Image: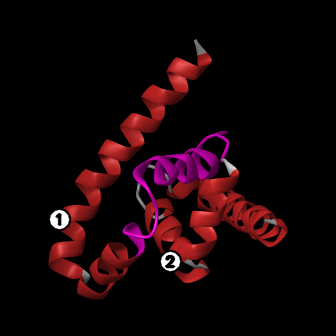
Amino acid sequence: MSKFSFQITTLFIVVALVCAFVPVFSVEEAEAKSLWNTCLVKITPKCALDIIGVVFENGTISDPCCNDLVKEGKVCHDTLIKYIADKPMLIAHETEYLKKSDDLWNHCVSISKSA
């Protein structure tokens, strides 16, 4: 049951993020939109969901997704996670999310180096 709950929560977050990103980026943040489009093409949708799951829930990430994350780059990772964490429904826990994001990055760098 908890796996189902996690999947529903992740799906909700992804839908909310898509709804939030499109209008905001297209009107107010041309540079952020460019970064989003540049970064998004470097990872698979599954890995993007896994990354969101790790940072905003208690998900796990595979070694191949870690490698994709490192290839995406720290600037992309930090910018996108910070943008998501700044959303009104998430901002109360932004510090926690940013720490989880840094922990994920460090974990993935260590995985990437050992590969």
In the image, farthest residue toward the front:
115
Residue 38 picture quarter:
bottom left
Q: Front-most of 86 and 35?
A: 35
Q: Residue at x 33, y 81 (%)?
A: 32
Judge whether 94 appears above or below 24 on screen.
above
Q: Is residue 103 above or below residue 57?
A: below
Q: Which residue is tagged 2?
A: 76
Label 2 residue SS: helix
Residue 45 locus on image (x, y percent): 41, 51
The part of the chain drawn in magenta is 39-61
63 up-or-down from 76: above or below? above
Viewer-side label of 1, 2: 2
Residue 23's tag is 1
Residue 71 x, y percent position in the rendering = 58, 75
Q: CA distance from mark 1 to mark 2?
A: 20 Å
Looking at the picture, tell me which residue is in the foreground, 107 or 93: 107
Q: Position of residue 7 (x, y in %)?
A: 48, 28
